[in-house]
Image (cartoon, rainbow, N blue to C red):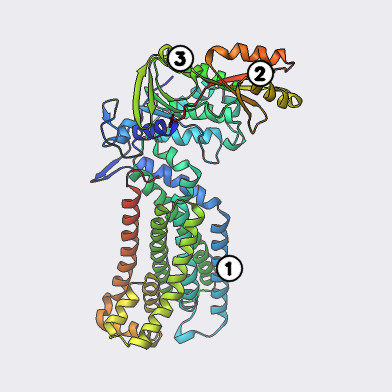
Amino acid sequence: MSSAVRKPRKLTQWGVFTMDLTFVWVIAWRELREALRHKWLWFFATGFAVLALALSQAGLATAGYAGLGGFGRTAASLINVILLFAPLIGLSVGAGTLAGDRERGTLTYLMAQPVSRADIFWGKALGAAVAVASALALGFGLAALGLAAARAGRATVYLSLVVYTFLLAFAALAMGFVIGTLARKSAAAIGVALVVWLVLVFAGDLGVMGVTVSLRPSPDALLAMLLVNPLQVFKLGAVYGLRATLDTLGVAGQYAVFRFGAALPWLLAGLLAGWAILCFGLAYALFNRRGDL
Amino acid sequence: MHAVAATLIKAILGLVDYRGRIQVGGHDARRDGKRARRNIGYVPQEVIFYDWSVQATMAFYATLRRADAGQITALLAQMGLDAHAHKPVPALSGGLRQRLALAVALLGNPPVLLLDEPMANLDAQVRTEYRTLLAELHRQGKTLLFATHRLEEVEALADRVLMLEQGELRAVLTPAALRATLAGDVDMTLRVPAAQRSAALACLNEAGVSAHLNGRGTVVARVGADRKVHLLRTLSGSGVEVIDFELELARRDPQA
């Protein structure tokens, strides 16, 4: 029996992290394969693609909204669709990744191999992120192909939306990982993820409206309330990216432009990235606890 | 007993927290778990693999265990799985899946095999084959650390027995000493024709033997180790045909 031993391709050590990138890639590839086999991921991806394509074609056929045309018009139309789809895809994939493996019993067996928890966690996170990005890229790609064929306007507005969408989806994915790390059952994790999605999508908007009407907060307080919800951060960033009229930003948005000026898009993108980093960090810390199987 | 043994196995694998110190191949199982696990091949009671082919499963774990790709073919042949290499794992029987678990455990040629009741869910014939495989690995120099409640497995494979009870190490024994200690009772699982099960049960109860029917339609009788042949004779004398039987150490009531 051969006992040849492969040398690690690269070893990264950082405090409690002991990662072997070979293992991270292998686990990520497995996770990606698993995620792409799930029917509901394709359901979301197809739904998003159909809507994106339909909106892009509608955008070409109608007059520009607020002076937008082609890519800009499509980007504006897509924002509300993305606000529903991107967090839903991210949260559900993230919640199901660890909880599903734990429930099936495959996680314990994987952890019994000579790999670290960091290898497993970050491999799974990477695989899930690529799966989510692929699902969204399908919709964006189809819409972009249609628009490019019609030579419809500047693509930078559209690309800005794509970047914000990916950041929002990764933030939602990271939140899903926190849920999946805590949940024992996959169904429970998905259930909690859906509740979080509902809160972010509906209660977040309604809550801000309610607080604004009843408490009449200062502009700073109103802006802060918006910025703690990644969906509102995305909306503000995406609408700002359209570079249309300031009134499309709303009062809080206009105040944000006044406060932060040209740094606003970077700040908003940073906030979304911060959500993703914070939640992935929290999920890893929870996952790394001893006995958490 | 099994819950304690399962926890001990998880501790050796660095999967649960514990007090004290466990070292495998000179590596601390808690602080340096990754290196410690490189010395361990783990076979659980019932392994759940991903929904892949046997070959793909082996390739995946070979990467994680830093095993040479050439070892996959050799191990599949050694475990009698070469004909099943392209089958999906869920299509394999329980016995073949346990062989696959053993093949995965041997990837990277670890010196220690950690087995958690690996034969508990196998039928008698497959269990015998599996035990032979393990005995051969033991003979080749592998250290087998396994949890079981079957005396025949202990006698066939073990040099040293650690008796665990209620979270405590009760004794370290040889298999012969274990037999002497536990010879008190065994559970005999008797396969009798369906039409004779009630008669068998009545006959055993009449003879003062504690017996019951289990969910699989077999009769389970608890007797002293020296009363096994007597029990078979009693049934035979009553006209009950015993088609087959299995023996298992009687689980001791922890409250007793």
Q: Nearer the viewer, residue B173 or A6?
A: B173
The residue that appears at 59% across and 37% down in the rendered structure is B90
**Identity of the amino acid at label 1?**
Val
Image coords of residue B157 (percent x, y):
45, 16
Task: Give the SS element for disc 2.
Answer: strand
Q: Tell me which corner region of the image, top left, top right, bottom left or bottom right, holds residue B159.
A: top left
Q: Earlier in the sequence, mark 2 or mark 3?
A: 3
- Looking at the rendered structure, which numbered label has been put on residue A50? 1
Image coords of residue A29 (percent x, y):
45, 46
Both marks 2 and 3 on one chain:
yes
Q: Image height check: is B60 above or below B222?
A: below
Q: Quadrant of the C terminus of chain B?
A: top left
**Identity of the amino acid at label 3?**
Arg
Residue A8 visible: yes
Check the residue under mark 1 and report the chain it is in.
A
Q: Which residue is mark 2?
A: B244
The residue that appears at 66% across and 18% down in the rendered structure is B244
Task: Give the SS element for disc 1.
Answer: helix
Q: Tell me which corner region of the image, top left, top right, bottom left or bottom right, holds residue A206.
A: bottom left
From the viewer's perspective, is the residue at label 2 or at label 3 nearer?
Answer: 3
Check the residue under mark 2 and report the chain it is in.
B
Q: CA distance from mark 2 to mark 1?
A: 63 Å
Q: CA distance from mark 2 to mark 3?
A: 23 Å
* Residues marked 1 and 3 touching at CB (< 8 Å): no
Q: Which residue is mark 3?
A: B179
